Amino acid sequence: MNDQQAQVIIVGGGPVGMGLAIDLAQRGVSSIVTERHAQPQPIPKGQNLTQRTMEHFWFWGVEEDVRAAAPIPLEFGIGGATAYGSLLSEYNYDWYQRALVRPFYFRDNERLPQYATEAALRRRAAQLPAIKVLYGYSAEEFTQDDTGVSVRALARESGAMLNLRGQYVVGCDGARSMVRELAGITQTRNDQDMLMALLVFSSDALNTLLARYKGKSFLNVLHPDLQGYWQFFGRVDTGSTWFFHSPVPIGTKADNFDFHKYLEGIVGAPFDCEFQHIGFWDLRIACADTYRMRRAFIAGDAAHSHPPYGGFGINTGFEDARNLGWKLAASLNGWGGPRLLDTYSEERQPVFVSTARDFIANYIEDDRAFLNKYNPQIDKSAFERAWEERSKGASAQINTFEPHYECSHIVAGPEGGACSALGDHSYEARAGHHLAPRILSCGANVYELLGDGFTLLAFDVGSECVEAFVAAARSSGAPLKVVADKRAGECADYGHGLVLVRPDHFVAFAGEPAGANADAIMAQAVGLQAV
């Protein structure tokens, strides 16, 4: 049996695993990635990439490649719409307009199939010597001890076995995660007792039929018979290829159900259709009770899984990778404090619990209540008034999805704060929240000047205070870059003279020089102690 070593062993080379490997490599940390598939699987899931995810891609050096691979150009439009009964009914409204929160992020969002995203991430990983990817290898088991982890990986074609050794292992190996199971990490699951179908099909006529939805790349139908569960169409490209998912009767198989007729009923008209893929899965929401067990971590679908509502899945996984990447690097590079790695689970796990409760489950419950109460065939005027109110609320929903870490041990957040996905977007710099982009007096966006480690934004702050933070960072070993500017123009929007930004672009501290204890603030931010 051959032995190979790296600082981190990543089980699963899908988008989250590859993103984590890239993040680690750019921070000087070596990794070995095991990925059982030699090529990305050509099923168009995980299509919506948020503005936040595209920030990651900009820093990972993959944004340009991802945008070049996108089959739907930005000028076409990548918004969504909701319809009642069928897509060609008289009732529809715009839904989940991500452009509304664009000012609070550095990059535009994007839309492309997950396999195209994976391919771009694979190309970027191949450029980084610190990453070794074992394609065609399946991780079979792992053990951990006081000094590290050992992973046994099987070559799927030859049957050869490799023993991989690292200081940490990260399971990015999907909902049936081997790493999660062998680490002894339990899950809380909410089974919906619902069988879901995923279809990929081509149709020459569907674009013409759905001309009313110009610029819309995803469309969901609320049907009174489905009790709030969506019938969801998404464009794979601007031509003839689509994907669709929906609940179907228990026992449905590819050969015992007329999917063509089913789709025509949901669209509201006959159209040509050729299926490329028909698959099934059980609808459930699951979340690991912790994301860390000693030297083992989990991320992406291994940590949380849910039905594809609102494009949360792949983007949540990338945020896991970004959060964990800098913390693993800090620990391996010697400046991460003893409580730092625990904050990965402390921050990310409750954010997904909130995502599942306050958004995914809430969407289903809210739609169910509406469908049970209103019906245009019974009381058309009451239905139309309620539909109009829903259309107004749909535009505001996107602003409330704002993951943050207010109660984290490594941010100087407010008393009584919580780590949650439910919040509001603001230009003000708030401890535990994502930093909004602002233009500096030099004309550059602040994101263009952020460092690889911590960044201290100092607005009209004296040199003595700045030097105190520089000295505190030097004492802890943490990398710190200082960006000094005037507290004027867009910089005044931050609302504070001092803003300490973490390597993942969340705010660790925001306040004024008076009373700011640089040593204590830096010690808290790197996980050495609480303020």
Image (cartoon, rainbow, N blue to C red):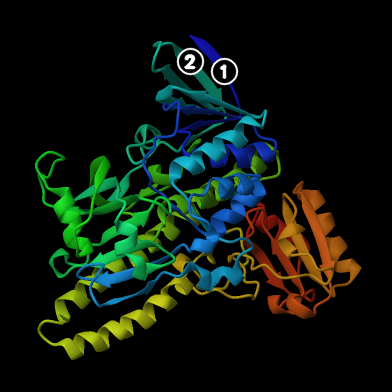
For residue 178, say whether it is visible: yes
- Residue drawn at (18%, 68%), measured in percent from left and top? 223
Q: Earlier in the sequence, mark 2 or mark 1?
A: 1
Task: Find residue 136 and report its horizontal and vertical position in percent.
Answer: 44, 22
- Residue drawn at (84%, 62%), measured in percent from left and top? 468
Residue 209 vertical position relative to residue 134 in the rendered view, above or below: below
User: What secondary structure is marked by label 1?
Assistant: strand
Q: Are marks 2 and 1 in contact (CB under 8 Å)?
A: yes
Q: Which mark is residue 64?
A: none
Task: Find residue 323 and report its horizontal and vertical position in percent.
Answer: 56, 50
Comparing 197 with 264, the one in front is 264
Comparing 260 with 12, the one in front is 260
Instruction: Specify the quadrant that holds the C terminus.
Output: bottom right
For residue 337, say whether it is visible: no
Q: Disc 2 marks which residue?
A: 162
**Label 2 Cα neighbours within 10 Å, binned few <14 / some 14-19 / many ≥20:** some
323 sits left or right of 420 in the view: right
Task: Find residue 249 and report its horizontal and vertical position in percent.
Answer: 11, 51
Task: Find residue 416 and report its horizontal and vertical position in percent.
Answer: 50, 73
**Label 1 Cα neighbours within 10 Å, binned few <14 / some 14-19 / many ≥20:** few
- Tell me which amino acid carries mark 2: Leu
Residue 55 vertical position relative to residue 27 in the rendered view, above or below: below
Cα distance in 3D space between marks 2 and 1:
7 Å
Q: Disc 1 marks which residue?
A: 4
Comparing 276 with 412, the one in front is 276
